[in-house]
């Protein structure tokens, strides 16, 4: 399995190098850069995704994603940058009830696993728990923007840049980044803080994102930006 | 005051008659009619709006709006029509915190009066309390559609018609109706079940709605529709 | 008719005074104020609305609204403030074709009168014609925000304040202001530059707007803001 | 290059088989199925994407995608199913003008290559040209839903299923499918009719789509559905 994963990742890197030639030649893969007023958007770092035993459980949570997000949150709190904690749950998870608020999504993925009544499923992971005054956004779909008030909220606060972390690269993180760009925010994908649950998915989704929708940037560069942007704006 | 209100209402009726001539002559004030699959949308019939003592408290709640909505809900439950209970609240009501989820609205109206921590404020009025499986939608703005997943939810359930009740005619009811039309639903304003808190506001807002955005229909006609539509669809 | 209109307006002013007492006492009718980076949004100042002979023709266009908007545009162009020219038209105005892009709106108002093929109908009035580089936004519904890219466009340009002019107070202007607020912009209704086609409608809609959604401000104060904001930001 | 592409595709198929085990085991990759009233959504099959010589030019257009879409359109026209022709262009493509309607997207990809003044760039490919009454939707971002009136338009027409074709798998097709699902429509990706411009991108994006957002279905099954659904609904 590890050998296969290595081979897959090698093959993908080769493909990305070829694609990069085409993209650069045509003017894709430009840098959007950081703006002047950031928000940190943590997507679905709630128990159903961060803890073992759920259909939504993801990889690399404990050793990589949570510690990275903790660092970013520390910077945000020190410098009073806005933090939004995003999670997903449903009031009516009866797949036979045509009035379920799962909409049509339960016809593709097991969203019935996150009932709103069981807070332990959709609560933000205690290791990166929201502080008083930080916003918890409950969504019903993949994107943290589509079908929510997030764009108006961020604009009201004067935000121009979103640093996005969380899971999954394939769905909620990618959709949040695509919509964030369309809503007029500079999306930054924090490379080490984005996960998924199948081999290769983080790689090809970050590649697509970086080519077309937002910059994929290292944790340390993101942290440095958060720590210095107020100073630079003075 | 009562005499003044009567005079105002008389003057408004005169104005509406004049306006109706202009509108009809030009092809406004058409009937959109009922469709085939309705949902009942109760807007902000939560304690802060239905009970005394809050800045948001409205008129005609106990004697008119709640009993009317109870009748509609009875029909919906008997015939398994979808019901959405809409309410409004905010996680951070500190007007000095630029990160408040009140956005910019607290710069116009006292939304700081509905903090999410105090459930008694934003809970749906117990007289029309949601049953298990009925959806409670929390919104941050006036419209039940804008910045929410309502359109996708209703479409997933095959809804084509929305019967709208609640408060206020000036803001949340009107916005919900305007957006409902734009999202492709037939909006029906249930005349006796819509309220406000200032004299005349229900009159001029229902007049505008009926001219351009949705039909204003009596409670009894709405109830009759809810009671017979399944039968008619057979 | 003039006497009747005077009486109506008098009665409305009385009602607004009463309502203002209630609103102020409860914390409504607050001032949202100007921000730091404005855009001018001219709503439906296209021929079908500004010229005689169309179902959509409005009042007070030649003598008041157009001259006012000309003044605002002069200031915007001098100081390089963003201008958006909004208009409305439809590709398929056959009311019997279920695939018409009029959606359901033709079941309320005569939108079949503005076919996209006849540019003369939906073109912006030549007296306030767009210059090269100024944006013309075609919409299908009442709001310039709902179902359009306007919010993302404005946010990309760093806009925080929208000065709204045009027609009608009842529909497209009001909806644009309500949605603008929800999307995180400070809405300013330019009092002299907003029109309608029925007696009283401008009065009661501006009253509602000012109470809850945006500030109603005089043309001269708006012009002064546009002329000095760059200077004040330095 | 062909050998490398074969190896990449082989490696990806292996990875998809592994991922499918995980997904199936956890309840992903469910079938959403066809509904009862379809629309065909052709995404960005306009000259800049279908003809040689543009930064946006895609692969497999002439030999595969256009002929497939022609077949689908034939069925739609015979059975009066709704067709939406989607394209993308911008009024102001000056990257130095902060008021450009490209928003922030030109900071990632070369959208300045599609100026609205040059119709030849954004016109729908003549081989699949719109007929009178079929809708042409101009969008500014990746998704045909986000920032457009498409959801309201489709709902007004009673549509419950969208068959999506066009380019690119990475961006506009994928975003349209994700948003279509969230808006309450059953998304079907027509396998042979979706393209891109870099090796592997169609494969990994269709895999992600099929796992989570919509069914990837063969052209012949889609055609059969379009040809028989009216009959089945009787």
Image (cartoon, coloured by chain):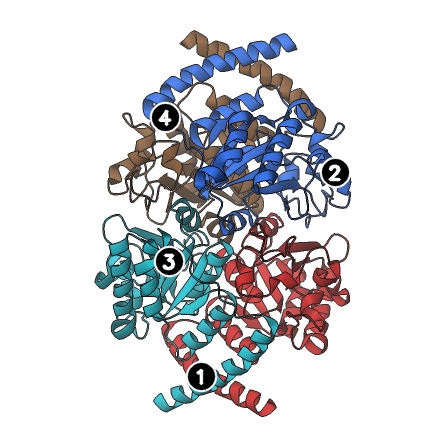
Chain colours: A brown, B cyan, C red, D blue
Which class describes the residues within 10 Å of circle 1: few (<14), some (14-19), or many (20+)?
many
**Foreground tag (3 vs 2):** 2
Inter-mark Cα distance, 2 to 4 = 43 Å
Pointer 3 indicates a residue of which chain? B
Q: C13 and D210: which one is in front? A: D210
Count of labels in the image = 4
Camera-nearest residue between A119 and D196: D196
Direction from residue D30 to residue D137 in the image, left or right:
right
Q: Is residue A213 visible?
A: no
Gap in Å between the C-alphas at discs 3 and 1? 33 Å
Assess disc 2: are there few (<14), some (14-19) or many (≥20) residues with their C-alpha within 10 Å of its C-alpha.
many
Regarding mark 2 in the picture, which secondary structure is present there? Answer: helix
Q: Residue at x 46, y 51 (%)?
A: A153
Does residue A49 sit above or below C82 in this rendering? above
Disc 1 secondary structure class: helix
- The disc at residue A58 is 4
For residue A103, side relative to residue C76 (left or right) = left
Position of residue B206 relative to residue A162, above or below, is below
Rendered image: mark on residue B94: 3
Image-quadrant location for residue C144 = bottom right
Kindly identify which residue carries mark 2. Answer: D121
4 and 1 marks in contact (CB < 8 Å): no
Q: Are both tags, 4 and 1, on one chain?
A: no
Estimate the spatial distance between the alpha carbons at disc 3 and disc 2, rounded to whole Å: 51 Å
Q: Chain of mark 1?
A: C
Q: In the figure, is residue B174 to the left or right of D148? A: left
């Amino acid at each position: 399995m590890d050998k296969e994963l290595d081979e897959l990742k090698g093959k993908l890197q080769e493909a990305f190098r070829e694609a990069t030639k085409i993209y650069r030649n045509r003017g894709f893969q430009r840098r959007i850069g950081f703006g002047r007023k950031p928000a940190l958007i943590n997507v679905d770092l709630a128990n159903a995704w961060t803890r073992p035993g759920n259909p939504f459980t993801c990889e690399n949570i404990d050793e990589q994603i949570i510690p990275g997000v903790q660092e970013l949150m520390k910077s945000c709190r020190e410098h009073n940058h806005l933090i939004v904690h995003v999670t997903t749950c449903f009031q009516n998870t009866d797949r036979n009830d045509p009035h379920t608020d799962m909409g049509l999504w339960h016809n593709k993925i097991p969203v019935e696993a996150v009932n709103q009544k069981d807070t332990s499923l959709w609560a933000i992971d205690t290791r990166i728990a929201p502080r008083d005054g930080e916003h918890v956004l409950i969504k019903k779909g993949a994107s943290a923007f589509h079908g929510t008030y997030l764009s108006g909220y961020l604009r009201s606060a004067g935000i121009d840049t979103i640093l996005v972390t969380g899971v999954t690269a394939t769905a909620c993180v990618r959709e949040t980044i695509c919509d964030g760009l369309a809503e007029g925010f500079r999306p930054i994908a924090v490379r080490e803080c984005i996960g998924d649950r199948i081999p290769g998915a983080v790689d090809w989704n970050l590649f697509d994102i970086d080519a077309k929708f937002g910059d994929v940037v290292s944790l340390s560069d993101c942290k440095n930006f958060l720590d210095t942007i107020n100073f630079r704006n003075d």
